[in-house]
Amino acid sequence: MKLVKIISFDWFICHRRYFGCCCRCSFYKPEYKAPSYPAPSYPAPAYPAPAYPAPAYPAPAYPAQAYNKDNKYADITITSQSDERNLDGSSQWSYAQSDYTTREESQVQKKMQGVTYDSYGKESYGEVLGNTNKGSSYWVSPEGQKFTLTWTADEAGFQPKGDHLPVAPVHEYELPVAPVHEYELPVAPALPYSRTGPGY
């Protein structure tokens, strides 16, 4: 029976130079693999929204509108207003106030007879282009009396109409009659005469 001497591994490691290459090749050398780590995931940083203080602007200071202390109607305002201008020269406009005052007016251009002047200042009478105007107005007096005025202005002049306008008095009288003189015209006296001359 053969005895097998158990050689310790440490002894073998120490004396493996004596066993040659075969012993060196018989050892298993594991393959090294680099460890794989999962990619780190970082949560998106949450920054608080910056809070800016609201800018404080001083309120504009407008000077108080100065009204005359004797003006009793400083609180009257315009409630409606219109203004229209046309290419043909005509126009019309109107407005209304909070105290019930209203006014409207219109004008048109019209050919009429009038005086014209040439470049030398010579005056002539002929056809000219002028403006005619008409309108109306309504207002209430401080005493509560209501007034309405209408007017027309053209080649005949300014012609207002209103119940409050004074009316010229009408005079009724007879024109004087020239006296009638009755008299006889004088008659020339008949003078006697005789014909004289050749043949008489």
Image: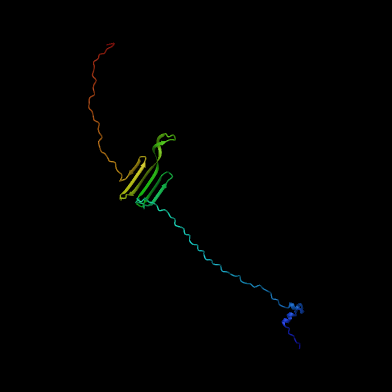
Left or right: residue 173 compared with residue 132: left
Say if 117 sits above or below 140 in the image.
above
In the current view of this chain or complex, which residue is farthest to the bottom? 1
Image coordinates of residue 129 in percent, x first then y, are: 41, 40
Image coordinates of residue 142 in percent, x first then y, are: 32, 50
Say if 181 sits above or below 86 in the image.
above
In this picture the colour scheme is rainbow
The C terminus: image quadrant: top left
Left or right: residue 85 compared with residue 170: right
Image coordinates of residue 135 in percent, x first then y, are: 36, 46
Write the residue at 36% across / 42% down: 153
Write the residue at 33% across / 43% down: 160
Left or right: residue 65 compared with residue 13: left
Q: Quadrant of residue 27?
A: bottom right
Q: Quadrant of residue 119?
A: top left
The N terminus: image quadrant: bottom right
Q: Quadrant of residue 173?
A: top left
Say if 27 sits above or below 42 in the image.
below
Write the residue at 74% across / 80% down: 14
Q: Nearer the viewer, residue 139 or 183?
A: 139
Image coordinates of residue 36 in percent, x first then y, are: 63, 72
